[in-house]
Image (cartoon, coloured by chain):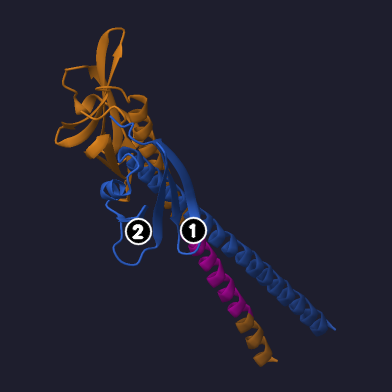
Chain colours: A orange, B blue
Amino acid sequence: MRRRHVTDTLFVLALLGAFAVTGLAAAVLGANAYSGIAAGMERNDALRASLSYLTEKIRHNDAAGGVSVRDLDGHGALVLTETVEGAAYETWVYAREGRLMEVTVIAGEAASPGSGQAVLELAEVSFTVEKNGLILIAAADARGNWAETAAWVRCGVE
Amino acid sequence: MEKAAVGARSRWLLLEIVAAVFLFAIISGICATLFVQAKEISQDSANLTMAMVQAQRAAEAFKAADGDAVATAALLKGAAEEDVVMLAFGPDWQPAQGEAAYTLTAAMSREGELARAVITVRGETDELYRLDVAHRAGGNP
């Protein structure tokens, strides 16, 4: 009778152990799946949205003298020039402190990197002007994932 | 009589525990399947995004190169064979030299002034994204 009582106790303990192990495994699996999905979404959101934003900006300003790539504080910046009511303005787009920034100044005035407005989360961005008005845009998110796209400027890049 | 009642109660308790663990195991199995499916969907979504970005990049290079396959390949740092440009990517979508997890091919053709390209991005087994591009050749400044 005593032996049966011990067996019952051991069985219940084994069940409890199995319950704890499977519970832990489910929690770990769930956490892994969640972190993987969150990382994928972040990569999608940060990179795709930034690259789309930049290419659309370039297309929107595709006019003679409208698009150029210049240096701002040692980093590449996209400069979009447009004329509003006879006055020329330059919009500088660049990455700083993990964000894609944008600042609009009167054409010819020096842009200050610190005065820009944050548009999107983006660790780094670089612009390379290739032949025939093609701008290669490479961007990196906070996790160091890089993606590259290109935008053709019909009117040429200065 | 009292011993029989205790035994019956103990059996019911054990049955209840077994039923609870069984239910938990079923729910855990369903959850695990859902997690795996969610991860696969997320991965497919990320791949589709990157395939689209790469196809767009190739389309822009095709237009910048005025529909020329060799010039397009040079801009994309890929290989050109006749009128087909090929690019290879690793599992992280970075350019790959050896075995590729993803491939992009741009098959180009010309009808008079109209240059066309069918850009296809493929994974190891299936097609991820396809983009048809047309460009008026000779129209670049």
Q: Chain of mark 1?
A: A
> Which residue has dot 1 on it?
A33
Where in the figure is residue B90, as x and y percent of width and height?
35, 60
User: A104 or B22: which is nearer to us?
Assistant: A104
Magenta segment, which residues? A12-32
Task: Give the class, few, some or many, for how many residues have Cα within 10 Å of label 1's Cα (few <14, many ≥20).
Answer: many
Where in the figure is residue A59, as x and y percent of width and height?
36, 29
Q: Amino acid at mark 1?
A: Ala
Q: Chain of mark 2?
A: B
User: A129 or A101: which is nearer to us?
Assistant: A129
> Does the residue at mark 1 contact the one at mark 2 (Cβ under 8 Å)?
no
Determine the secondary structure under disc 2: strand
Farthest-out residue, right: B1
Determine the secondary structure under disc 1: helix
> Which residue has dot 2 on it?
B88
Farthest-out residue, front: B112
Q: Nearer the viewer, mark 1 or mark 2?
A: 2
Q: Quadrant of the N terminus of chain B?
A: bottom right
Our reading of the magenta stretch's main secondary structure is helix
Q: Report the disc number at residue B139.
A: none
Q: Amino acid at mark 2?
A: Ala
User: B113 or A76: which is nearer to us?
Assistant: B113
Please tell me which residue is depicted at 28% across the width and 63% down the height of the picture. B97
Please tell me which residue is depicted at 57% across the width and 75% down the height of the picture. A18
A69 sits left or right of A18 in the view: left
Please tell me whether residue A80 is drawn above or below residue A133 in the rendered image: above
Farthest-out residue, top: A85
User: B31 or B62: which is nearer to us?
Assistant: B62
The answer, for residue A86, to whether it is visible in the render is yes
